[in-house]
Amino acid sequence: MAVAQTPALRIGAHVILDEKWSKNASRENRNFVAALKAQTKSGRIETLPSDRLYQLYQSGQLDCILTGGWPHDDPQLISKRVLTFEVRLLTLANTDLPARSQILVGRMKQFPPPALPLETTLVDWLPLQNLKQGFDLLRARRIDALLADPSHIQNAPQQTHEDIIAADLPAVKRFSVPLLCHDTDYNRDMIDMLDQETLTQ
């Protein structure tokens, strides 16, 4: 379906979806994000802390957001196509998480704490506004692990994370993050276009 010629959109997300991220992302995720960026005013998806993301969206300053944790029940358009993240525990190199009796794990605040593959370890949780905060706390050793998709290991501006690795543990969970948009004719047509199977071919 052709999208009507109207001003491009402003789209926000919790995580940075840039070229560094694309190098480690799945083909389906790369294609979906590229199609979204083509719809935006700036050619990019803005990265914002959770509270600011929801505030700008509710006030109408953002047209759409990528989120798996929308806290409200009001009607919105939700894409069938989603970003899929395989969430794992990230930690500093040479850290043996199963050997510890207690750990503090950072997680994005909009997602509830999942069960972890650490049966004999006591886990405490620290809710985070964004992944950059998690990387900074992990590097400063103020948390022991960070719950994130490994494609985000290189996901902070002007930083590399060679010292941060995925723990040698099974994946924790797969998250599906849809596009959420205000209900307009233009957004409805755009989501119909994004949901077409040809995006992943």
Image (cartoon, rainbow, N blue to C red):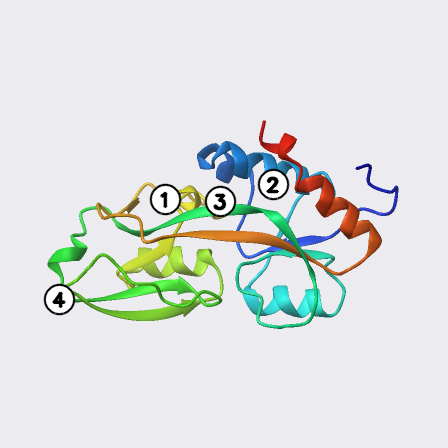
Task: Pinpoint residue 45: horizontal percent, then vertical percent.
Answer: 64, 48
Q: CA distance from mark 1 to mark 2?
A: 23 Å
Task: Pinpoint residue 68: horizontal percent, then vertical percent.
Answer: 53, 59
- Cβ–Cβ under 8 Å for marks 3 and 1: no
Q: Going by the image, does 46 lie left or right of 113?
A: right
Instruction: State which quarter of the image contains the C terminus.
Output: top right
For the point 13% across and 62% down, the residue is: 100
The quarter of the displayed image where residue 115 is located: bottom left
Q: Secondary structure at mark 3?
A: loop
Q: CA distance from mark 4 to mark 2?
A: 40 Å
Quick one: which residue is furthest to the top in this view?
Answer: 201
Q: Which residue is mark 1?
A: 161
Residues packed near mark 3 inside 10 Å, few (<14), some (14 to 19) or many (20 plus): few
Q: Residue 11: which disc?
A: none
**Tag 3: residue type?**
Gln
Residues packed near mark 2 inside 10 Å, few (<14), some (14 to 19) or many (20 plus): some
The quarter of the displayed image where residue 113 is located: bottom left
Q: CA distance from mark 3 to mark 1?
A: 10 Å
Whichever of callouts 3 and 4 sits on the residue coming sooner in the sequence is 4
**Tag 2: residue type?**
Val
Q: Secondary structure at mark 2?
A: helix
Q: Residue 158: which disc?
A: 3
Q: Residue 101: which disc?
A: 4
For the point 16% across and 65% down, the residue is: 121
Tell me the mark number nearer the camera, choosing from 3 and 1: 1
Q: Which residue is mark 2?
A: 33
Quick one: which residue is furthest to the right in this view?
Answer: 5
